[in-house]
Image (tube, rainbow, N blue to C red):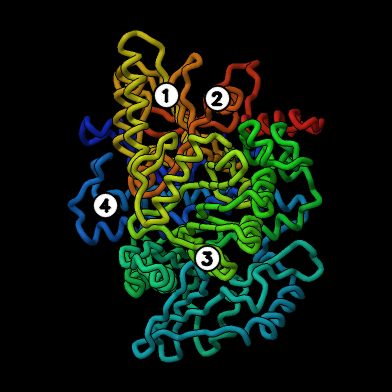
Amino acid sequence: MFADDEIEVPAVPEEPVKKDKKAKYECFENRELSWLRFNTRVLEEAEDPETPLCERLNFLSIYQTNLDEFFMVRVGSLTDQMQEDDTLKDGKSGMHPSEVLSEIERRVRRLSVRHGRAYESVLEELKRYGVKITNFSSLEHDEAEYLEAYFRSALLPMLSPQLIGKDMPFPFLNNRELYAFASVINKDGILRSVIVPCSRTDFPRLIRIPGRPHEYILSEELILHFLPLVFPRYLIREKAILRVTRSADLPTDRLSEDVYGYRDLMEQLIGSRKRLQPVRLEYSRNLERKTIHNLCKNLGIEPERAFLNSAPSDLSFLSDLREDLHDNAELFYKKRTPQYSPLVDEREPVIPQIEDHDVLLYYPCERMSPMLKLLDEAARDPDVVSIRMTLYRLAKDSQVVRALIAASEAGKRVEVIVELKARFDEENNIRWSRILEDAGCSVMYGFKSYKVHSKLLLITRKTADGVRFITQVGTGNYNEKTARLYTDFCLMTADPEIGRAAEKVFNALSSNSIPEDTGELLVAPHCMRDRVIGEIEQQISLARIGQDAYVGFKLNALTDKTVIKKLIEASEAGVQVELIVRGASCLRTGIPGKTDNIRLISIVGRYLEHARVYIFGRDGRHGVYISSADMMSRNTVRRVEVAAPVKDPVLKERVLHIFRLQMSDNVKARLQRPDGRYRTENVPEGTAAVNAQELLFDEAYAAAGNTETKA
């Protein structure tokens, strides 16, 4: 496993260690540049020879998909900022938008070299198993003849080639689609350009080489090779595969508060995303500088946004290669199956068990089924009068939606808040909102200025003993697929105080207002950050009178400057701070006199670390919360988020145990250094390996009485 500064890349200069322009920025890191360090950690998993070979394929693809979304969202937004006012500075790093963009471009160029090398390395190893992506130079004569015949019969009739010239405008290039491009010369010596779309469903991406069951050529490479057959009257001068990435920064400020207008306008905005400004051009082979400049001019982007990739710009075909090798178990992670929670007997009704004791599930080590069973039981329970729920991201075939529809059809009052601005899931959520409406559910949407990102479910029952609540609070989405891939907590409780707090939240949301007084629950944007700051200040006060003081956070990202400044203050006061931050962190740790009491690690491994946990205090005085919110200003002040206290001492200790085990990880954890970079720690010889993700699964197997515990 290598850190992002330990791979020798002669073709691209090593990233220098920058000194901050001003002392006031020394404890801070730019958000975008920190995120690139996170994606570097993803790339490291693809480079790591200890990662099973087919899983390395997966990490190569994840790295690329992550980078696509980064350009679409963050680079798109930064580009808008630069064009509007480049004098504005990032409050954490002091960098102007143009400076950040320049640094992104430089780092991505360097990472592209590493990504290409990792891709070639994995392909070389795949050859040992008979799997190969080939090119024409390695084909036999009869194989080349077969592919030419295949191209003429199967591909050529499906193509829509376009010649570009003075009277033939440059075509619109769709977001993230592949195009064969060439500079060509006609018989009169006039230079033209040609473009052929390659991303089609009429033919397969992987074209099999005859007589070689697991050897392929990519369809776009076949098209590129046979461009002379597409344009027979032209001489090919240079050629490459092109791919454009467009901004996805939708102008959601145009959204109407009107319920139906909101959804209709959201659909229009989604459609407009396809035509937003390009933010990146990728090309597969060396092209003349003048050619690149002309392409960029036609696309309306700066030449600095053009990147040469040695790996294909679309690696979605790697999943097919993984399928070819599914019988080779040693090339994959050992199969892990979510286990039954010892807190729930799924042979018995779930609701009485939750009324007897709080239940805490930890995905993917434990099954999501108790939460789904809770919804199914609520749909049938004659005492249940209402089900209220927030939905952010759902599976394509959602059991959650099926249960809500069943409840509505059974006469229950079902109120659902569907967030239509869940980025890249907007269309899926619009579809589900219509299905729920058609089933008789009351469907509401998030606000114009606030996303509803909370994971909150409230079941209200009217019994002989009065009104009772079952409340579920989660750190992750109600998505059966991601519950097997992401680490998340799910708390189900009959605690009346939490139930009343959840009722306040839903009453506010259903009246189109933001919750103000939320009791037991911490609810953003008005009732979370101040209470978190207050908890940290309490630990600072303890440290200043010589008592043991502690703060722990597990997050996807840490970028909220107000929280970061309070953590720096806590460190200066002597509070011990432990942070697990998977992605971007704008806080730099280990700076003497400033952040040297803060230890920050990032875990990137088999499962996506997604749970959010807040811990305040030690020695039995812990305040422990699980939450849907990262410490980002978008979460703390621009979204509706919920954090719930874990009250039960046994469940609280379980959360603390998981946190401590992850803090002790010495296999998949990287420690942040004072310069903002990350590296694996040196483990003394004889020290036991601690892979927290695998050990937590072992524990789940053991708790369920399953003897197959070792990965």
Considering only vertical position in the picture, is 590 above or below 201?
Answer: above
Circle on res. 433: 3
Q: Earlier in the sequence, mark 4 or mark 2?
A: 4
Q: Residues within 10 Å of mark 4 (few under 14, many from 20)?
A: many
Residue wearing tag 2: 656
Residue at 44% x, 34% y: name it.
520
Disc 1: which residue: 551
Circle 1 or circle 3, nearest the eye:
3
First of labels 1, 3 by sequence position: 3
| Position in image of residue 158 (x %, y %) | 61, 84
Above or below residue 18? Residue 268 is: below
Cα distance between the residues tagged 4 and 1: 33 Å
Q: Quadrant of the C terminus?
A: top right
Residue labelled with disc 4: 97
Mark 2, secondary structure of its residue? helix
Q: Label 3 near label 1: C-beta < 8 Å?
A: no
Whole-angstrom CA distance, mark 2 to mark 1, is: 12 Å
Name the spot of residue 522 as percent of width and height, x first: 41, 37
Packing grade of label 1 (10 A; few <14, some 14-19, many >=20) is many
